[in-house]
Image (cartoon, rainbow, N blue to C red):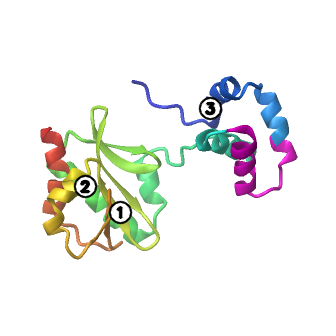
Amino acid sequence: MPERDPSRESHFPTIEKKYGKPMSHWHRLMKTLAGRKYDEQMGLLMEQHGFTRAHANALVMYSRGSTTTRRFADPEAYFASLDAVKARTMRAVFASLHKDFPDLELVIAWNQPMLKVGKRYVFGAMAATNHILLAPWDTSVLKSLSHRLEGYEVNKKTVRVPVDWKIDKKLLRDMVGPQLDS
């Protein structure tokens, strides 16, 4: 299965087919909405023209000059976009996992660093303003580790750690390892 085309234009053939008008029509409409807020433009497309959120976002963002959803060419570009503390912690998380699981590939997906084996994702992480989110792909892993996650904020799919987190290598290994056994 090829990688998904991250360009906003990749949505255009489907938009034409689904909403029954050529892209020239939609581009003219967007010109009449220039200067309006993002939410207004999205609302008009979704409420008055039946656009899905994904299609509306593609058209709105394209009309605002954003031609791709891809923000980072590779994991290093992602890490370089972070402040020094977050970058150090994120690099350490992935270095620890790579040491234990050298066959995993570190990639950018959904504009976040992710580890995958073949076509299957097994782990991702995201640096937020005041924390880092760790995300094993199989959420049952979080349930099985719940007794070891006391003291962390655990959501349905993520574990929140401080930006300067002292890496718990065993915990990281136990988040990823069980997904490779299945």
Q: Position of residue 182 (x, y in %)?
A: 15, 38
Say left or right for 64 vs 84.
right
Upstream in sequence: badge 2 or badge 1: 2
Q: Which residue has dot 1 on it?
A: 133
- Location of the N terminus by quadrant is top left
Q: Position of residue 63 (x, y in %)?
A: 75, 43
Q: Which residue has dot 3 on it?
A: 11
As helix, strand or loop, the secondary structure at mark 3 comes to helix
Residue 74 included in the magenta stretch of the image: no
Q: What crowding class fits label 1: few (fewer than 14 Cα within 10 Å), some (14-19), or many (20 or more)?
A: many
Upstream in sequence: badge 1 or badge 3: 3
Labelled disc at residue 68: none
User: Residue drawn at (32%, 59%), measured in percent from left and top?
Assistant: 156
Please, what is the three-letter code of the amino acid marked with disc 1? Leu
Numbered range of the magenta stretch: 30-50
Between disc 3 and disc 2, the foreground one is 3
Q: Quadrant of residue 88?
A: bottom left
User: Residue drawn at (33%, 63%), measured in percent from left and top?
Assistant: 155
Between disc 2 and disc 1, the foreground one is 1
As helix, strand or loop, the secondary structure at mark 1 comes to strand
Q: What whole-number distance in Å separates the C-alpha atoms at marks 1 and 3?
A: 30 Å
Please, what is the three-letter code of the amino acid marked with disc 2? Ala
User: Residue drawn at (57%, 43%), measured in percent from left and top?
Assistant: 69
Q: Nearer the viewer, residue 34 or 166?
A: 34
Q: Which residue has dot 2 on it?
A: 95
